[in-house]
Amino acid sequence: MGLRRSWQRWIGFWTDRPQRKGTTIAERYTVTRLLGMGSYGLTYLCTDEHTGQEVALKESKPSKGTLSVRLLEREAEVMGRLEHPFIPKLLESFSYLGRNYLAAEYVRGETLEQCIFEQGCVYSEQECLELVGRLLGPLNHVHQQGYIHGDVRIPNVILRDGQVHLIDFGLARRMGEPLLPELKRRMRDVPLPEDEPAIADQDLQDVGHFLLFMLYSAFEPEKGKAPASWQEELDLSPSMRVMLERLLGLRPGYEGGVPELLADVRDMLEETK
């Protein structure tokens, strides 16, 4: 098994090498730089030679075979059904020289991950609520169209001019759709029942973890003190504590979905005025 994994890594190293800066794909998209490399795709910042605009171009990973292609096709299908000012617009999807691509609007800004870990940004409880309140707009739109995002995390949320943009729909799926069997085998560390269908609550649990990341940005551990649970480490208002426990499944959740959560967020923000 170890030899097989080593061989797969070696194959992946050679087949998944990023496109070089200046490479033009499909005689249209010229690579400026690599934006990120995920498990199943590579995303580049490109210039659209037809329009002069910056675009995000996602490329399927050859080493992942048909699974990568299927995920990219599904991502294009989902994005094609979404129309929201804070969700990147799908421009086109196509195949070129044996690889599959997805071109989308590029949102220039900073991910929340960059804000916290690179810039050292610290968020108060009120600021966390304000950001989550803005995030729930695009997330609610995704749910209204019959999908879940499936990967609401700090690297997939971009802050730009005070607005919150939700990006990367690589794990999005239709409500009720089970996880692809190939992904189940690769995600054994994820606590999901074998055939759990996609439901809105999965995104809300992610919002709970998202909130925790922001709240921990202001946490300073005491030297010599052993790590403890977030309930013990974070100094939170009673309302925030209850909200997190509901999101994380420690109390009855938000059966009303995003609208019910958003109402809670707004009530809590009114309390802080």
Image (cartoon, rainbow, N blue to C red):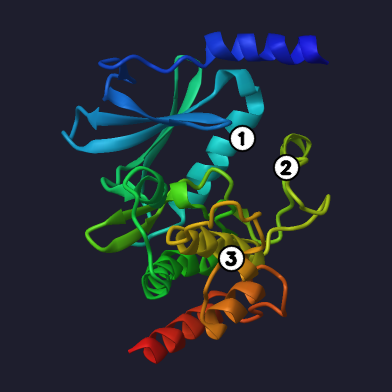
> Is 247 drawn above or below residue 103 in the view shown?
below
Give me the C-alpha separation between circle 3 and circle 1: 42 Å
Q: Secondary structure at mark 2?
A: loop
- Residue beneath label 3, please? 233
State the quadrant of the N terminus: top right
Q: Is residue 142 visible?
A: no
Q: Secondary structure at mark 3?
A: helix
Q: Circle 1: is it few (<14), some (14-19), or many (20+) Cα within 10 Å?
A: some
Residue 165's quadrant in the figure? bottom left
- Left or right of 29 on screen, residue 215: right
**Cβ–Cβ under 8 Å for marks 3 and 1:** no
**Cβ–Cβ under 8 Å for marks 2 and 1:** yes
Viewer-proximal residue, 172 or 206?
206
Res. 70 mark: 1
> Is 155 drawn above or below residue 254 in the view shown?
above
Res. 180 mark: 2
The three-letter code of the residue at mark 1 reads Arg
Q: Earlier in the sequence, mark 3 or mark 2?
A: 2
The three-letter code of the residue at mark 2 reads Leu
Q: Secondary structure at mark 1?
A: helix
Viewer-proximal residue, 177 or 183?
183
Q: Earlier in the sequence, mark 3 or mark 1?
A: 1
Q: Earlier in the sequence, mark 2 or mark 1?
A: 1
Q: Position of residue 29 (x, y in %)?
A: 28, 25
> Is 241 drawn above or below residue 154 in the view shown?
below
Q: Position of residue 88 (x, y in %)?
A: 36, 50
